[in-house]
Structures are given as C-alpha cells and as structure tokens.
Image: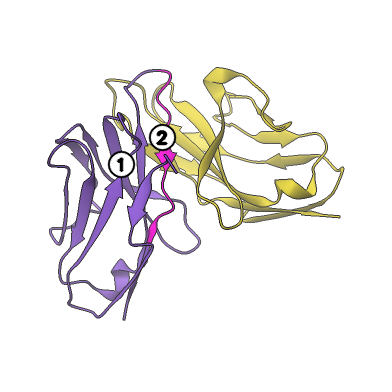
Amino acid sequence: DTGVSQDPRHKITKRGQNVTFRCDPISEHNRLYWYRQTLGQGPEFLTYFQNEAQLEKSRLLSDRFSAERPKGSFSTLEIQRTEQGDSAMYLCASSPNWGQTNIQYFGAGTRLSVL
Amino acid sequence: AQRVTQPEKLLSVFKGAPVELKCNYSYSGSPELFWYVQYSRQRLQLLLRHISRESIKGFTADLNKGETSFHLKKPFAQEEDSAMYYCALRGIPGGTSYGKLTFGQGTILTVHP
C-alpha cells in the first residue's frame, strides 16, 4: 500500500496519559496535514507542515497537543494529559506541491478513546 | 470566517432516482471547492473538485458564486453510491486558510434497491 499510513489504528488510554500517533505520508509529498474528526462532524483542521516547517496551527490545537515532522518525512502528533474530550478520529493527509494539482490524500486514521 | 454547511445529515433515495446533496459555503473571495466521499470501511477520498469541471461516477457539481453553493448531483443514483459525502473548501494561495481544507458536517446518502 503506497497511500498515507497511520499508526496505530486504534488507541485506548486512560485520562491523564500521554499518547503519540504517527503518520507516514505518500513518498515525496512535501505537505502533511493533521485533522480531527468527532462523531457526527466533518474533519477539522489541526495543523500542517511543508517539509519540516509547521506553517499553521488551529486554535483547536491546545498546549497539550504538539506535532512534529523532524526530517520532512513522517510526522508525529502527541497529546499530553489526555482528556475525555480528546476522544476522536485523528486523520492525516498529504499532498504534493502547492498548485492546481494539489490534492490531499487521507490516511485511514487513528481512533483515540480516552476512558 | 470560512464555513461549509451541508444542511442534510441524511438523504435516502431509491435506485434510479435523481439525487442532489446540498453544500453552501461562506468565504470572502474565490475558494476552491471539493466533494470528498467515504465508503463503508474505507478512507476519505476525493470525488471531484470544481476546477476540474468533470463528471466522476456520474456525479457533477457546479460552483454557483452568486448563491455560494456547490451542490452535488447525479441523475440516476446507484446502490453503490451509498456513502458519507463531505463538501470541503480551500482558500486561495496567499489568502487566509492557505492549504487547509474546511469541511462540512457531511451527508449520509443511502440508495435503496
């Protein structure tokens, strides 16, 4: 499978624990995006990278959330001191260069359940 | 602020009937509009985009700037069209919301045999 890969697919954690998700974009895609999707809602933008630079962060991304893309390839999203409200599907997407051919390809997502 | 509204959470039609999934947007400028689809147990995937002006799987969508709408239409629905459909907006280069997609809440389409 050469699409966007996310790991793990499911994560169950207790309130207060830290969790980290990984996203491997399509090879040579220099843009990488994180979205969060809660039940009954469409995906909401969290942050995105162009290569290793984090270019935009949503107000949804509180201080407990941090994302990195250290070498401009895979990315990690960490949530510290998880809360029940963090329970959601976390989606990653990647795209090639900006322009009219820029289409975002989505991974299958990581479903987080905070107990 | 930019916003995408899909007024119908659920839409049911019978096979062979026409279908229209509504999408309205709010954005100061000329955004790029998309329809994404998610079939059961599959990931979100692009169905079509307004700049392509093409028909995909029999679906078309026309951007109406006057009404700020981007409704998705198909003249004869098929059972395999049953899925969740999301309308999404992306701002223009150099403007606000550069790059990111803003999604509507989605419409679940069910096509009955």
Q: In this view, does B80 lie above or below A51?
A: below
Q: In this view, does A83 lie above or below A111?
A: below
What residue does disc 2 label? A104
Residue A33 disc label = 1
Q: Image quarter for residue A13?
A: bottom left
Segment colored magenta: A100-110
Label 1 crowd (10 A; few <14 / some 14-19 / many >=20): many
Subunit under mark 2: A
For image coordinates 53% across by 19% down, the residue present is B51
For image coordinates 71% across by 46% down, the residue present is B81
In magenta stretch: residue B88: no
Name the spot of residue B91 as percent of width and height, x first: 37, 28
Predominant SS of the magenta segment: loop
Q: Image quarter for residue A29?
A: top left
Label 1, secondary structure: give it. strand
Name the spot of residue A81 as percent of width and height, x first: 16, 72
In magenta stretch: residue A106: yes
Which amino acid is tagged 1?
A: Tyr
Image-based side of B41 in relation to A102, left or right: right
Image-based side of A57 in relation to B50, left or right: left
Chain with yellow colouring: B
Residue B93 disc label = none
How many numbered discs, if any? 2
Label 2 crowd (10 A; few <14 / some 14-19 / many >=20): many
Q: Is residue B70 above or below residue A70?
A: above
Chain with purple colouring: A
Task: Please state, as top left, top right, bottom left or bottom right, where the N terminus of chain A lies in the image.
Answer: top left
Label 1 with label 2: CB-CB less than 8 Å: yes
Which amino acid is tagged 2?
A: Gln
Q: Image quarter for residue A101?
A: top left
For image coordinates 40% across by 55% down, the residue present is A109
